Amino acid sequence: MSDKISGSDAVLKVIQDWGVNHIYGYPGGSFDSTMNALHNQKDTLKFIQVRHEEAGAIAAAADSKLTGKIGVCFGSAGPGAVHLLNGLYDAKVDRTPVLAIVAQVPTSRMNIDFFQAMDEEPIFDDVAVWNRTAATAESLPRLTDEAIKQAYEKKGVAVLTIPKDFGWAEIEDNYVSAANTHVEPVYPDPEPTSVTKAAQMIKDAKSPMIYFGIGAKDAAAELKEASEKFKMPLVSSVLAKGILDEDYPAYLGSTGRVAPKPGTEVGFATDLIVWVGNDVPFSIFLFGKKAKIIQIDVESEKLGKRRHIDLPMLADAKKALRAIIDAGEAKPDSAFYEASLADKKNWVAWQDSFKDSDQMPVRPEPIFDVLNKTASDKAVFGVDVGNVNINFERLVDIHGDQKWVTSGKYATMGFGLPASIAAKVAYPDRDVYSLSGDGGFAMLMEEILTQVKYNLHIVNVVFSNETLGYIEAEQTDDSHQPLSGVDLPATDWATAAKGMGAEAFTATTKAEFQKAIDAAKNTDKPVLIDVKLTHEMPFTTEHMFIDPAWQDQAKIDEFVKKYQAQDLKPFSYFLKQAQAN
């Protein structure tokens, strides 16, 4: 006869079969049976006690985004379950596999208005690709196995709800998981006629470009080769930052509100876009409507989803680009291509001109200059949502084996701090940074206690400008309304962090920030640096007034003065120069 094991122990054994060695959560009475199993398996499965279930779910999502492996979190019945939802929605929207284990009151207390009892399954129906409540203790290991398979297959959230008594129940310890049958999907080759059509479209185009997303994460070499052979500048989605080194000349960064100027401008001057592995919801607004589109994706439902396309290619990004490169004819330099590279040089030089600015309160460029020079080639950044996204996207020079993670399409504030915990747990030997505005940081700042509890050496940078800057800019530039509800109280975040047990510093200048970063290297404790940042908004690419060829000069003068943009030239300026050569 086989040995006996508790239902919760069986669940955790299956999770470990799938390569999971840590789990985020916060205990509750309804979860006692699984907490007992975590104690039983503490030598092989690390329990990380976050301060709020939302942070645990965000950490699990960030963990999955960074590593490609399933993240696991849990919540107790009722409030604990509900608290998971925000982090789980981030995983759903950014399509990364997460398993949420949800506690339920004992079966004898279900559906009779018991303490913390609620019908939990319906609240997870929208967020989950798989959502089940165990009906027997014996089914728990098989349900766990299926949950993980579904999360991987459908790139989303699987929710397994466990009544407390099933977790305690003794069952046969004879289940063999399917973990060893999991293989990475093999994506399709491009159809030959579509390759021929794509090569011809590129040949005929006068100003072609490449627009790539995280679907091209394994195709960096092909992206560069296609760019060089066909003289196509490269623009990425925000989340695809890091696929190419920032200093690659033809890589113009991302496009849209958080993007640098060159990536935003080029989309309105192109006549052909090779659209690779990209599902950005704002894409309809980011490019000229007359541009032709070749779209490459492994999911047929993505083809034509964001705008009309001219040539769909259901294929792996790497394979499709390789086929197009081999089939196509090399193109000479064009004025469009040369202007794109010159536009980038102008933008980078303009940004660099502020690196040593002594403006008070401090600008972001001096702070990020220090980060670029001190972060290692293996640094990992957990990036919150708001203006910090804009500054990170434009000013951090991702290179080498550096990694970063943020809340993408869901864009939940509070992401940075729990994401940095996930990064340090997944990569304990790397230097890890959380980057947050004061608005996002305040939402889940209690997770400094988690860093302290587990002695996680993370450098937490809080950019304090006493406003919800991203929303302030929307109210000012988009809806032209009086500022409403965006002001934040001045706060001494360093003192707050010290009270939690972290090392902490306040920086009002580049030199003070450098001193704090240097001091952070001399401790193994979590570190917080409160940067008192300028209230001025980042340069807006959505509402640029910089081109006298078609914009009002008075508005240009006002815009240039506001953003100190005297040295910036519009894309049309560089295009005219290139055409004259």
Image (spheres, rainbow, N blue to C red):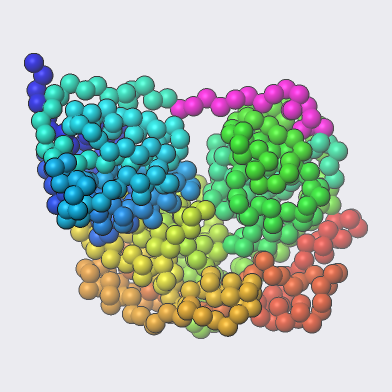
Vertical placement of residue 171 versus 44, above or below? above
Residue 318: which quarter of the image?
top right
Q: Residue furthest front?
A: 112
Query: Does 197 appear in magenta?
Result: yes
* Residue at 61% over, 39% down: 302
* Residue 307 visible in the displayed image: yes
Front residue (pair 92, 450): 92
| Residue 428 locus on image (x, y percent) | 30, 48
Question: What segment carries the magenta color?
Answer: 184-200
377 with respect to 546 (left or right): left
| Residue 478 locus on image (x, y percent) | 64, 72
Residue 542: which quarter of the image?
bottom right
Front residue (pair 148, 114): 114
* Residue 65 visible in the displayed image: no
* Residue at 39% over, 44% down: 125
* Residue at 60% over, 52% down: 281
549 with respect to 277 (left or right): right
72 with respect to 343 (left or right): left
Instruction: Indicate the quadrant containing the N terminus: top left, top right, bottom left or bottom right.
Output: top left
Front residue (pair 144, 230): 144
Vertical placement of residue 239 versus 507, above or below? above
* Residue at 43% over, 76% down: 464
Query: Does 423 appear in magenta?
Result: no
571 with respect to 533 (left or right): right
| Residue 66 locus on image (x, y percent) | 42, 45
Vertical placement of residue 560 versus 170, above or below? below
| Residue 336 locus on image (x, y percent) | 81, 52
Instruction: Indicate the quadrant containing the C terminus: top left, top right, bottom left or bottom right.
Output: bottom right
